[in-house]
């Protein structure tokens, strides 16, 4: 029987899709691309914004419309956070939350046994254990994402994630090591540690372990040459944490640290747990401790009550830090959050205008960053090869590099000299 997966959202979702894919493959299913005809389609959803929910609904309906005889399964964050909305999607034959992902085989068996629609969303509870099937590969990729943490205790006023993901839960170090060793044996030279609130790793342990221990564990695996961190929350990254990370030579000097706003007044309404001065010092410490460090971030525009003055403060702060890349998105009201009931909602046209202004300024900073890479000798992990023979890969600080006339293979790390830029990437010449 053929089964296909369609994933929306973050790196954690991508990891969980891989875990489900390996689980069903081990039990006799043939995993195919979602563009192919399959007996079962699994949509692993995201619900971080209203647009995410829209894409989920569209995907469920599209797969059912194109393949009316197939079984459509909806899972992930959307049904977990909004079970009633998920249940109303009649095109979905099976609906489960992300807490039930590991039971996907049992749910499929039950459906074929009874022929009845299944709705099974079990709410997260405080004290839940970290449960996930380990992976041994990462389909179609030369780097592997490894989920080591789930859940969030922060309750930012705009965010539904504590509902869709539950409280902080961490993967034991011993399990991380075994999973990484398996990936290393299968040829992965770079891994990315990911989580919902990654920097809170270990908070649920009583043994004192934290994110530094997870990084040290990953860097200790002999055949892994690069370790990268997924998105981080700034308030957990202390000076001591940075000093610990700096001792790990395999740790890539690229850090995605969520900002959301560069205005203190806005940050307070968001219930973020830092201010701009603390964030500024964090960036300074990272750049002082890591050579060729690049910093990327997320910025929200048009949050409830954001005035023109507050937006300008946020814009000025983003320009001051000089992020190497910024993900910009307009605020989206999430039902079930505190901010749902905030007054002074910003009009859609104003949010779109602010996003455009922020994007234009960040594009200038990005272009300057790429220009500064010219002349550098770098190591590039080859990831994809185009039909014209060009390889595209990434440096340790996550600069995209295009290399012509390269005899390497995807998954290999080669040395190159950056000679030019092209669009949002650098041009490199292989030197070894």
Image (tube, rainbow, N blue to C red):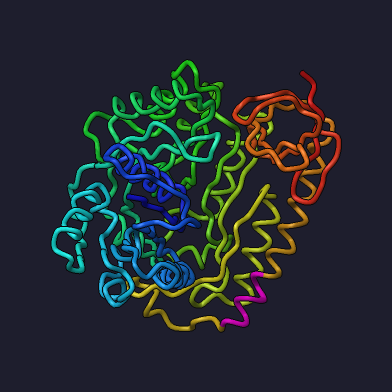
Give the quadrant of the C terminus: top right
Residue 226 coordinates in the image, percent (x, y): 55, 27
Image: 278 above or below 384: below
Residue at 20% x, 55% y is: 107
Magenta stretch: includes residue 351: yes
Q: Which residues are magenta?
A: 348-355
- Apparent side of residue 29 relative to residue 9 in the rendered image (left or right): left
Residue 67 coordinates in the image, percent (x, y): 41, 67
Q: Quadrant of residue 66?
A: bottom left
**Observer able to see residue 122:** no
Disc count in the image? 0
Magenta stretch: includes residue 213: no
Image: 312 above or below 226: below
Residue at 60% x, 76% y is: 351
Foreground pick, 274 / 19: 19
**Observer able to see residue 168:** yes
Q: Point out the residue furthest to the top here.
A: 222
- Apparent side of residue 294 relative to residue 56 in the rendered image (left or right): right
Residue at 29% x, 28% y is: 175
Q: Quadrant of residue 363?
A: bottom right
Q: Point out the residue furthest to the left here.
A: 114
Chief secondary structure of the magenta portion: helix
Residue at 39% x, 29% y is: 214
Foreground pick, 185 / 10: 185
Image: 114 above or below 203: below
Image: 10 above or below 120: above
- Apparent side of residue 173 relative to residue 283 in the rendered image (left or right): left
Foreground pick, 226 / 288: 226
Residue 336 coordinates in the image, percent (x, y): 31, 73
Q: Quadrant of residue 394?
A: top right
């Amino acid at each position: 029987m053929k089964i296909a997966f369609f994933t929306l959202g973050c790196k954690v979702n991508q990891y969980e899709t891989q875990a489900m894919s390996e689980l069903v493959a081990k039990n006799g299913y043939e995993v195919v691309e979602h563009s192919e005809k399959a007996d079962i389609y699994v949509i692993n959803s995201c619900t971080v914004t209203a647009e995410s929910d829209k894409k989920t609904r569209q995907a469920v309906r599209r797969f059912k419309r194109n393949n009316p005889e197939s079984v459509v399964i909806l899972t992930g964050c959307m049904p977990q956070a909004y079970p009633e909305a998920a249940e109303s999607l009649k095109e979905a034959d099976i609906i489960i939350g992300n807490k039930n992902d590991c039971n996907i085989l049992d749910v499929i068996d039950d459906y074929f046994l009874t022929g009845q629609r299944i709705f099974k969303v079990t709410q997260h509870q405080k004290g839940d254990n970290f449960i996930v099937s380990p992976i041994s590969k990462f389909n179609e990729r030369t780097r592997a994402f490894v989920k080591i943490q789930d859940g969030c205790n922060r309750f930012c006023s705009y965010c539904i994630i504590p509902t869709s993901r539950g409280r902080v839960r961490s993967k034991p170090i011993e399990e991380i090591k075994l999973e990484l060793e398996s990936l290393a044996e299968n040829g992965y030279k770079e891994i990315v540690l990911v989580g919902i609130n990654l920097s809170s790793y270990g908070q649920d342990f009583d043994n004192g372990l934290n994110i530094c221990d997870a990084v040290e564990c990953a860097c200790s695996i002999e055949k892994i040459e690069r370790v990268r961190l997924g998105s981080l929350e700034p308030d957990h990254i202390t000076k001591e944490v940075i000093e610990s990370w700096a001792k790990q030579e395999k740790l890539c000097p690229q850090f995605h640290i969520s900002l959301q706003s560069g205005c203190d007044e806005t940050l307070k309404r968001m219930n973020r747990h830092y201010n701009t001065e603390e964030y500024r010092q964090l960036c300074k410490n990272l750049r002082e401790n890591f050579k060729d460090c690049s910093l990327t971030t997320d910025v929200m525009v048009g949050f409830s009550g954001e005035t023109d003055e507050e937006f300008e403060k946020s814009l000025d702060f983003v320009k001051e830090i000089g992020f190497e890349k910024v993900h910009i998105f307009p605020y989206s009201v999430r039902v079930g959050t505190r901010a749902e009931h905030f007054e002074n909602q910003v009009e859609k046209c104003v949010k779109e205008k602010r996003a455009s202004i922020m994007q234009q300024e960040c594009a200038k900073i990005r272009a300057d960053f790429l220009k500064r890479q010219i002349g550098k000798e770098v190591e590039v992990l080859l990831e994809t090869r185009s039909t014209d023979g060009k390889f595209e890969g990434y440096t340790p600080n996550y600069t995209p590099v295009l290399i012509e006339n390269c005899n390497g293979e995807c998954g290999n790390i080669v040395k190159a000299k950056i000679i030019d830029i092209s669009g949002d990437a650098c041009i490199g010449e292989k030197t070894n």
